[in-house]
Structures are given as structure tokens and as C-alpha cells.
């Protein structure tokens, strides 16, 4: 449900003349958004790109463990888990964005994605939405930009429409369009948001059920008897992956495993066991690259995920981001996997 008081959120500062550098370094999020406050037509939302991509992870889809005490909980529908997670793994590949979509955009760079997601994190927190909603929102955003070329001044419109659709899918009560327009300083009208909503639905071919990492995270946590500390910290780490385009080309199940494994390392809870492999479907070797990227992002949160860091400083998130920073830079660097002589 929306909070009682919805405030205007300052817009990310997107330059009027974008650079064409494709792999620019991550920059600190800037809490202002300088784009024209004028009406724009929808032409920029109709230019589609037909360049399909495929990504097939090397994993075993049948990872059903033996019976345990949780199998007797009827709410976990244990007898259907094999079919459920096989379907989720199929859909997470089918509904994955193109990890190289920015090469098709004429006005955007990865820098803009960092800025708009930083703004979306604030909007998401303003409305007190579910974590699943944020991940689904970013999936819609990336998939839309994989198919549609937009001008830079349409980026925030696409972002709030993605948040609106994700909220309608995940939440009991989605934010009102008027509230979304308000946090954008009334740059857009209700009519424009509705038009863009229809445009996004068509661009996504009405495939709205992209599996997020949270269901996979819950499954992996069975290996540690649903340890609340590991899972809470893993939620922060999984959210951090939203802020870096290098994670776009990886399925949600792998994101969950990377976040969980990194959480275990930060909490010094032992190694990746055969049970973790069984519940996640990934070996430790398959996760090393993602774990290292994630640990690198944690070294300088002001540059990679400023809004997310502030969000997880809250007591309701057990101050997960503060805990990570208190570990210190030398320790974070020491936890990264170092290449062995065999891999050099």
C-alpha cells in the first residue's frame, strides 16, 4: 500500500547531449533531473528493434532434494516444486533482456541506466513496495529498451510505466497514476502515462510474469535452515545487482545464488556445499565471476548504488549496508576469489 504522504522525488541529472561512450565507468548518482518540462509525442516509443538474443546457462534443471521437515508444509506444495522451478528456469531465459541492448540506443548509455534505477529505488521506497516489484520493474525496463529505441527525455516516463505495471502484477494495491505523476513533478499527464503503458504492454508482448530472484533465494536458503541473517543480507546484495548492467545477461536463479553465496562469505558462514548446489543448481565455480563483481560494487557504494545503500541503512533491513561497510575495504577485497595458477 502507498504511504500516507507521497513526496516529489528529485529526478536524476541526465545530460542533454549524451556521450556515445558505450562502457563508461559507473558514476555517483546525482539527485536532480534536468530535462524539459514539456509534452512529447509517443514517436520515440514505437521504433522497435528485432534483434533476438539467446542465453542458455549450463545447469541441471532437476535439483529436487530429498524429503525434509519442510516438505510436510502444505503451503510449500512440495509435490509440485520440480515442475514449478523447471518452469521458472525456462521463463527466466525466455524473458531475459538483451544484455547488449544499449548498443542499439542512439541517445542512451549505461550511465543513464544507473541514474534512472537510482531514482526508481527512491520511488519504490516512497510507495513501500515489495522487493519483487522492483526486480520485475527493472526487467520490464530492460526488456522494453531491448526492443524500443527512445530519446533520452522519455527515459523517466518508461521507468514510471515499468514501475506501474510491476506494481499491478505484484502488489495488492498499485500506486495511483496521479501519485506517480506527482513524484515526477507533474512533467507527464495521466493520459501520456496510460498511452505509454499500452505501448509497453505491446512491446513486451504481454509477457509480464518474468521470474525474479526472490523465489530462488527462498529455495537456496533451505540449505541453511532458512537462516535469517544470510537471507536478509542476501536481499541487499541481490538488489545491488540491479544497479550494474553486467548482471543483465544472467538469469534470476544465478543472481539469487550469487547474492546468497556472497552473503555467506560476508558473514563467514562456511563454504558452498553440495546442498547449496542442489537447491540452487549452480556450482561454486559458476558463481565466482558474479561474486567478484558484486564484492567490487560494495567497495564504493556512493559510485555504484547510492540510493540502494541508503535504503538498506534502515533498521527494517537490519542495517545490512552499514554492516558491509563496517567490514572495511581491505576485508572486502580479501574476500574476492583470486585466480589460481591453473586459471591464469
Image (cartoon, rainbow, N blue to C red):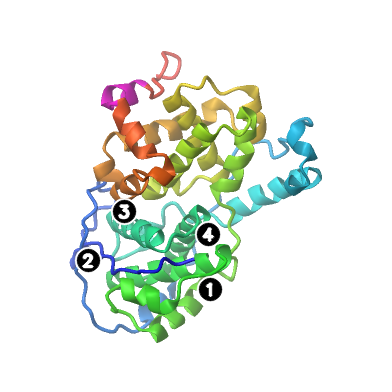
Specify whether residue 217 is painted magenta.
no
Q: Earlier in the sequence, mark 4 or mark 2?
A: 2
The residue labelled by disc 1 is 201
Indicate which disc residue 33 carries: 2
The residue labelled by disc 4 is 52
Depth check, front residue: 216 or 43: 216
Q: Give the structural element (helix, strand or loop) at label 2.
A: loop
The location of residue 256, given as percent across then percent down, is 53, 40
Q: Residue shown at 45%/36% (left/top)?
A: 233
Q: Are marks 4 and 1 in contact (CB under 8 Å)?
A: no
Q: Earlier in the sequence, mark 2 or mark 1?
A: 2
Instruction: State how far apart marks 4 and 1 are (Cα).
Output: 18 Å
The location of residue 302, given as percent across then percent down, is 24, 44
73 shown above or below 336 = below
| Quadrant, the C terminus | top left
Q: Which residues are magenta?
A: 328-334
Q: Earlier in the sequence, mark 4 or mark 1?
A: 4
Q: Based on the displayed image, in which of its 4 quarters is residue 146 positioned?
A: bottom left
Q: Earlier in the sequence, mark 3 or mark 2?
A: 2
Q: Residue shown at 45%/15% (left/top)?
A: 342
The location of residue 140, given as percent across then percent down, is 48, 63
Q: Nearer the viewer, mark 4 or mark 1?
A: 1
Instruction: State how far apart marks 3 and 1 are (Cα).
Output: 23 Å
Residue furthest to the front in view is 4
Q: Earlier in the sequence, mark 3 or mark 1?
A: 3
The residue labelled by disc 3 is 114
Instruction: State how far apart marks 4 and 2 are (Cα).
Output: 32 Å
Amino acid at each position: 500500500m502507498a504511504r500516507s504522504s507521497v513526496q516529489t522525488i528529485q529526478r536524476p541529472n541526465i545530460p542533454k547531449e549524451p556521450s556515445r561512450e558505450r562502457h563508461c565507468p559507473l558514476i555517483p548518482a546525482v539527485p536532480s533531473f534536468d530535462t524539459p518540462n514539456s509534452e512529447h509525442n509517443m514517436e520515440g516509443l514505437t521504433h522497435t528493434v528485432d534483434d533476438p538474443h539467446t542465453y542458455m546457462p549450463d545447469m541441471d534443471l532437476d535439483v529436487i532434494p530429498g524429503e525434509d521437515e519442510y516438505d510436510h508444509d502444505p503451503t510449500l506444495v512440495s509435490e509440485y516444486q520440480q515442475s514449478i522451478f523447471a518452469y521458472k528456469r525456462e521463463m527466466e531465459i525466455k524473458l531475459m533482456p538483451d544484455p547488449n541492448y544499449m548498443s542499439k540506443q542512439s541517445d542512451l548509455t549505461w550511465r543513464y541506466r544507473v541514474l534512472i534505477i537510482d531514482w526508481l529505488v527512491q520511488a519504490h521506497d516512497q510507495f513501500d513496495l515489495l522487493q519483487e516489484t522492483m526486480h520485475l520493474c527493472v526487467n520490464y525496463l530492460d526488456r522494453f529498451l531491448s526492443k524500443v529505441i527512445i530519446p533520452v527525455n522519455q527515459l523517466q516516463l518508461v521507468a514510471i510505466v515499468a514501475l506501474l505495471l510491476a506494481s499491478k502484477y505484484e502488489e495488492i494495491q498499485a500506486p495511483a497514476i496521479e501519485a506517480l505523476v506527482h513524484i515526477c513533478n507533474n512533467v507527464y499527464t495521466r493520459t501520456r502515462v496510460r498511452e505509454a503503458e499500452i505501448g509497453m504492454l505491446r512491446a513486451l508482448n504481454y509477457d509480464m510474469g518474468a521470474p525474479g530472484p526472490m523465489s530462488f533465494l527462498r529455495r537456496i536458503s533451505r540449505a541453511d535452515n532458512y537462516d535469517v541473517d544470510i537471507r536478509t543480507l542476501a536481499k541487499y546484495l541481490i538488489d545491488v545487482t540491479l544497479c550494474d548492467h553486467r548482471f543483465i545477461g544472467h538469469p534470476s536463479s544465478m543472481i539469487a545464488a550469487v547474492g546468497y553465496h556472497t552473503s555467506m562469505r560476508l558473514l563467514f558462514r562456511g563454504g558452498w556445499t553440495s546442498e547449496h548446489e542442489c537447491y540452487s543448481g549452480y556450482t561454486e565455480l559458476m558463481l565466482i565471476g558474479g561474486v567478484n563483481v558484486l564484492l567490487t560494487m560494495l567497495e564504493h557504494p556512493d559510485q555504484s548504488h547510492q540510493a540502494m545503500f541508503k535504503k538498506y541503512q534502515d533498521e527494517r533491513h537490519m542495517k545490512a549496508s552499514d554492516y558491509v561497510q563496517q567490514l572495511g575495504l581491505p576485508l572486502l577485497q580479501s574476500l574476492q576469489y583470486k585466480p589460481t595458477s591453473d586459471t591464469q
